[in-house]
Amino acid sequence: MSAAPVSIAIFEFLDSTHQDIQDHVRQLHGLVDAIESDGLNAATRALARRVLNYFNTEARQHHLDEEKHIFPALLASQDAEVVQAAEHLIQDHGWLEENWIQIAPSLEAAANGNLWFDPAELRHALDVFEALYLDHILLEESLAYPEAKKRMKGIDTIGMGREMARRRVMAQDEVRALA
Ligand SMILES: [Fe+2]
Ligand SMILES: [Fe+2]
């Protein structure tokens, strides 16, 4: 595969991960609704486990991919707005991690069939998490990715594409299309 299609595949892959993240946030809302109305059962426990695993692995890995492959090109920019955006996005990853560690113990409990947490508090934490994620994704898709795409033109992105895809190929069938 030539460099150009792989480069495109990197951004398609990052965009599709944003869709996955938003899909899992929606699933998390559905889970809180279900727990509030019916408590825990086999289905809600399984959903809690699935969403917990997703944010513990894929979403964290997505942040690492951006910090390794996307943001350095922006931090090296002469454009102060671009540098500031990259710094802001890196800081967001820290806040998202903080928010996530407020949420994760409740999901771990739900997955294990324990309802010691307050679903209303979980909903509040989820609202904060979602609002930050949506703003974050918007800034990445409107500014960071387009700027990175410009700056990465002409450089060898094959290694990056392989590295990201290889990790996912092991876990997700759909990523095989990008490898
Ligand atoms: Fe990000
Ligand atoms: Fe992202």
Image: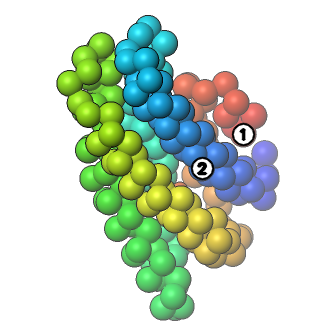
- The answer to whether 35 appears left or right of 12 in the picture is left
Label 2, residues with CA under 10 Å away: few <14, some 14-19, many ≥20: many
Viewport quadrant of the N terminus: top right
The residue at which mark 1 appears reads as 178
Q: In this view, does 147 lie above or below 112?
A: below
- Residue at (40, 75) in percent of width and height: 87
Q: Please, which residue is most extreme toward the top here?
A: 42
Q: Which residue is drawn at 57% across and 45% down?
A: 22
Q: At numbered mark 2, what does the secondary structure look like: helix, strand or loop?
A: helix
Residue 64, image x, y percentages: 42, 52
Nearer the observer, 3 or 11 = 11
Query: Residue 116: which quarter of the image?
Result: top left
Residue at horizontal 74%, vertical 56%?
8
What is the number of the mark on residue 18? 2
For marks 1 and 2 on the same chain, the one whose residue lies earlier in the sequence? 2
Query: Which quadrant would the C terminus be assigned to in this image?
Result: top right
Given residues 139 and 175, the one toward you in this image is 139
